[in-house]
Image (cartoon, rainbow, N blue to C red):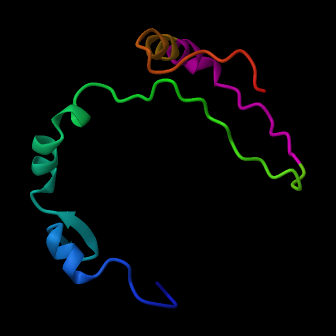
Amino acid sequence: TPSGTDIMGVDLFDALDFRVVMGINKARGMKEQWHKQWREVFEGVGKVCGYEHKPHVNSAVQPVMQPLRRIPLALREEVSAELGRLERGGIIERVESSP
C-alpha cells in the first residue's frame, strides 16, 4: 500500500505459485490444480438461487434519474433472443418493476 506494508508479500506469491513477468501476473499451474480440486465450481453455469439483492442506499444522497439506454434497432432482435435464452436457462429472471 502507498502508506504502509504490502498485504501480499513474496512468501504468499511463492505459496500460490504466482510470478510477475514483465509486469504481467501469472499463476503457473494453478488453473489446472483449481479445476481438479473444485471441479464442481468450474462445470456448467454458476448461479445463486434464493438471494434477493438489497442495495444499501444512503438517504442523505440526492437521487439522480439516469436516461433510458435504448438498444440500437439493429440489435434489438438479437438482444431479445439472448435474453429469452438466458431466462429459459434459469440464468436470469424477469423483473417487472423496480422497488
Q: Residue at x 62, y 34 (%)?
A: 53
Q: Residue at x 55, y 13 (%)?
A: 80
Quadrant, the C terminus: top right
Instruction: Indicate the quadrant where residue 77 lies.
Output: top right
Image spot of residue 54 (x, y percent): 67, 37
Residue 87 vs residue 72, the one in the foreground: 87
Q: Residue at x 26, y 68 (%)?
A: 25
In the rendered structure, the answer to whether residue 63 lies left or right of residue 28 reads: right
Q: Is residue 11 magenta?
A: no
- Count of numbered labels shown in the rendering: 0
Q: Is residue 23 above or below residue 87?
A: below
Q: Is residue 86 above or below residue 61?
A: above
- Any part of residue 21 in sight: no
Instruction: Indicate the quadrant where residue 98 lies.
Output: top right
Q: Residue at x 52, y 91 (%)?
A: 3
Image spot of residue 65 (x, y percent): 85, 39
Q: Is residue 13 above or below residue 42?
A: below
In the rendered structure, the answer to whether residue 91 lies left or right of residue 30 reads: right
Image spot of residue 11 (x, y percent): 20, 80
- Any part of residue 96 in sight: yes
Q: Is residue 73 magenta?
A: yes
Span of residues in magenta: 63-80
In the rendered structure, the answer to whether residue 75 lies left or right of residue 63 reads: left
Residue 30 vs residue 70, the one in the foreground: 30
